[in-house]
Image (tube, helix red, strand yellow):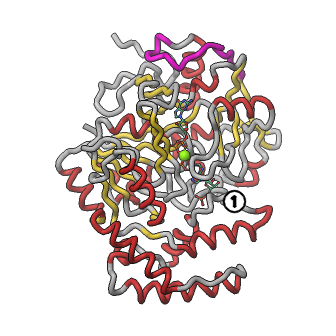
Amino acid sequence: MANVIVIGAQWGDEGKGKITDLLSSSADVVVRSQGGVNAGHTVVVAGQTFKLHLIPSGILYPDTECIIGSGTVIDPEVVIEEMEQLKKLGVTIDNLYISQTAHITMPYHRSIDRASEERRGDYKIGTTGRGIGPTYADKSERTGVRVLDLMDSKLLPEKLEWTINYKNVILEKLYNLPPLDPKEVIKEYLKYAEYLRPYVIDSSLKIYEAVKKKKNILFEGAQGTLLDLDHGTYPYVTSSNPIAGGACVGSGVGPTIIDRVIGVAKAYTTRVGEGPFPTELTEEIGQLLGDRGAEFGTTTGRSRRCGWFDAVIGRYAVRINGLDCLAITKLDVLDTLEEIKVCVAYEIDGETCYHFPSNASHFANCKPVYKTLPGWQQPTTECRTLEDLPQQALDYLKFLAELMEVPIAIISLGASRDQTIIVEDPIHGPKRALLDADGSPVNEG
Ligand code: GDP
Ligand code: IMO
Ligand code: MG
């Protein structure tokens, strides 16, 4: 029995969807606690691909309760489409619940997100254009619309009329955009409200009741550590807290109920959008990683920037999230390489630096210090145990575990559920990390 947080240890798209789906077989409840439809989590089961934006990746298990938590922001149009899509594919959503205190993304949020990005020009963030920043900004400014408001069909028209008229000033005067017709938006959102009403609950209470019954709860992070509003590569971040601490805030649970935190990291690094990326590879090898890893954004279809594994940000993710262990994904993408580099430190102004610098301009000037390891140049997609892995692949993983100072609990070698090596079952199993913190194999006795 355990309550587990799964977070992204890099810049998002680490494979959280695959790992959450995998662990959901042992979970009673799966909670998404932050982010919105900027996320794109892919789950591949029996050759069928599911792309989830806001619905937790546990949804494919009909007996697992899936909760869209209070720290998320909900674009009703996209979520309803996602729900309908799942139903069409034969997936039940009777086990889906939506927090009444989550915030709603409105059409003006999307328009302002896109228009402000255009206005920023060279300083743009490269957002997903899904209205995430403006929705969270309104939440902080206290002009947000919550699920509770959406459910109040008497008060909603009044609230939206005022808010839309207020936002129209910004749309028209600041961005030269046409104003929204409050009547039309109200009509549309009242329709969404009726569709969503049966799913709306007091999510914190539901989770607390599950805790009291000693159920297994999985908290599925969206985005990644380096996209965290407070601890990421600000300002090139998202507007929520994807780190482990954010899971408690965004679900309405206390930190004392959490048993474990698993960090998901690719065996290399990717990033979508703007912002510094020290190990980025812009030429042949970057292209090869992008092609072999099919590195295109699940939400926007944009090409992801690719680079070598960066153990400095990895160690930072261990620190900021209090990681217990790692799930390393997409090891198979490296299968053809003759040599593989790992960034072990940065050089800044002639000084070697082992820690992530929070100063954005320092980070932008970091030069990676690499250690080169031999590749294995053979396929790993069929490996199912550590013994099946080529020695060089095992050495590579041991090196990562050593640098990150945490054990590797899961190794992923393909998008499907079965293309996985569970080194240490992070939910039920005895503590038997085969790759210890110092990188040496643990003697299982
Ligand atoms: P998330 O946002 O963290 O859930 O990750 P995404 O779903 O956006 O991106 C990960 C992509 O890699 C998806 O297309 C997955 O199907 C795929 N994937 C996950 N694990 C592996 C793996 O071990 N090997 C390969 N080749 N693909 C994987
Ligand atoms: P998952 O959950 C990768 C990035 C955007 C942009 C920045 C801000 O699939 O890992 P936003 O629209 O959030 O205001 O954009 O954050 N970003 C992601 N990158 N994976 C994601 O989610 C992301 N969600 C947002 O590309 O750089
Ligand atoms: Mg993704």
User: Is 90 displayed left or right of 409 in the figure?
Assistant: left
Residue 371 visible (yes or no): yes
Q: Is residue 218 above or below residue 245?
A: above
The residue where tag 1 is placed is: 125
Q: Is residue 103 above or below residue 97?
A: below
Answer few, some or many: residues within 10 Å of disc 1's Cα (few below 14, many 20 plus, some between 14 and 19). some
Going by the picture, which residue comes out furthest to the front? 88
Q: Does 380 lie within the magenta span?
A: yes
Q: How many marks?
A: 1
The foreground one among 402 and 286 is: 286
Q: Is residue 312 above or below residue 342?
A: below
- Magenta segment: 372-388
Q: Secondary structure at mark 1?
A: loop
The foreground one among 236 and 304 is: 304
Residue found at x 39% / y 55%? 83
Label 1 within 8 A of ligand 2 by Cβ: yes
Residue 64 place in picture, x, y as percent: 28, 45
Residue found at x 67% / y 48%? 302
Residue 342 place in picture, x, y as percent: 67, 28
Q: Is residue 196 above or below residue 421?
A: below
Residue 344 visible (yes or no): no
Examine the residues drawn in magenta and state their main secondary structure: loop
Q: Does 382 lie within the magenta span?
A: yes
Q: In the rendered structure, which amino acid carries the disc numbered 1?
A: Ile
User: Is 98 displayed left or right of 402 in the figure?
Assistant: left
Residue 173 place in picture, x, y as percent: 70, 86
The foreground one among 51 and 54 is: 51
The foreground one among 383 and 328 is: 383
